[in-house]
């Protein structure tokens, strides 16, 4: 699962969440889920932390799109370390994905 803001004023967007190795049998994730308890992992996001980082566009920067994507992969595990850069994770996912579904939400401050 990835959460990405392509509208962040960074020149490269902003990664809000990269969760991986979530068991295929998982059909929902409750708020505040500990991914480690279900076998999943998180990469460091652009906030410099792990886990989900909420929407927080700069005040007055207009509407931002938040893209939440679930990926169908040909393997049940990705060989990524916790400090793998988000761009490398995105490249890896896009290269091997069988399919994906994206929900886009919008937010402004």
Image (cartoon, rainbow, N blue to C red):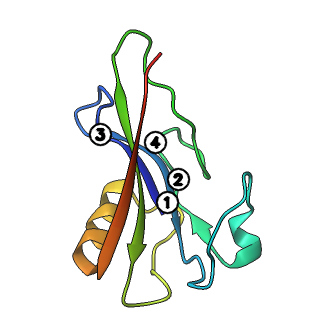
Mark yes or no: residue 47 visible: yes
Counting from the top left corner in percent of width and height, residue 29 is at: 67, 63
Mark yes or no: residue 89 visible: no
Return the residue nearer the eye: 58 or 48. Answer: 58
Nearest to N terminus: mark 3 or mark 4:
3
Q: Is residue 83 left or right of residue 89?
A: right
Q: Nearer the viewer, mark 3 or mark 4?
A: 3
Counting from the top left corner in percent of width and height, residue 97 is at: 30, 78
Q: CA distance from mark 4 to mark 2?
A: 7 Å
Q: Is residue 89 above or below residue 24?
A: above
Q: Which residue is mark 3?
A: 6
Residue at the image position 26 percent from the left and 69 percent from the top: 94
Q: CA distance from mark 4 to mark 1?
A: 11 Å
Nearest to N terminus: mark 1 or mark 2:
2
Element at label 2: loop
Disc 1 packing (10 Å; few <14; some 14–19; many ≥20): few
Counting from the top left corner in percent of width and height, residue 39 is at: 68, 79
Q: CA distance from mark 3 to mark 4?
A: 13 Å
Q: Which residue is mark 1?
A: 83
Nearest to N terminus: mark 4 or mark 1:
4
Q: Nearer the viewer, mark 4 or mark 1?
A: 4
Q: Which residue is mark 4?
A: 46
Q: Nearer the viewer, mark 1 or mark 2?
A: 2
Nearest to N terminus: mark 3 or mark 2:
3
Q: Which residue is mark 2?
A: 44
Disc 4 packing (10 Å; few <14; some 14–19; many ≥20): some
Element at label 3: loop
Q: Which mark is residue 3?
A: none
Return the residue nearer the eye: 85 or 74. Answer: 74
């Amino acid at each position: 699962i990835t959460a990405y803001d392509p509208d962040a004023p960074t020149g490269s967007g902003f990664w809000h969440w990269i969760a991986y190795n979530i068991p295929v049998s998982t059909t929902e994730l409750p708020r505040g889920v500990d991914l480690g308890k279900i076998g999943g992992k998180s990469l460091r996001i652009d906030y410099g932390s792990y886990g989900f980082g909420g929407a927080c566009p700069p005040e007055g920067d207009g509407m931002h799109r938040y893209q939440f994507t679930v990926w169908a992969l040909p393997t049940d595990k990705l060989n990524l370390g916790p400090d793998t850069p988000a761009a490398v994770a995105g490249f890896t996912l896009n290269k091997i994905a069988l399919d994906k579904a994206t929900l886009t939400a919008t937010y402004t401050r």
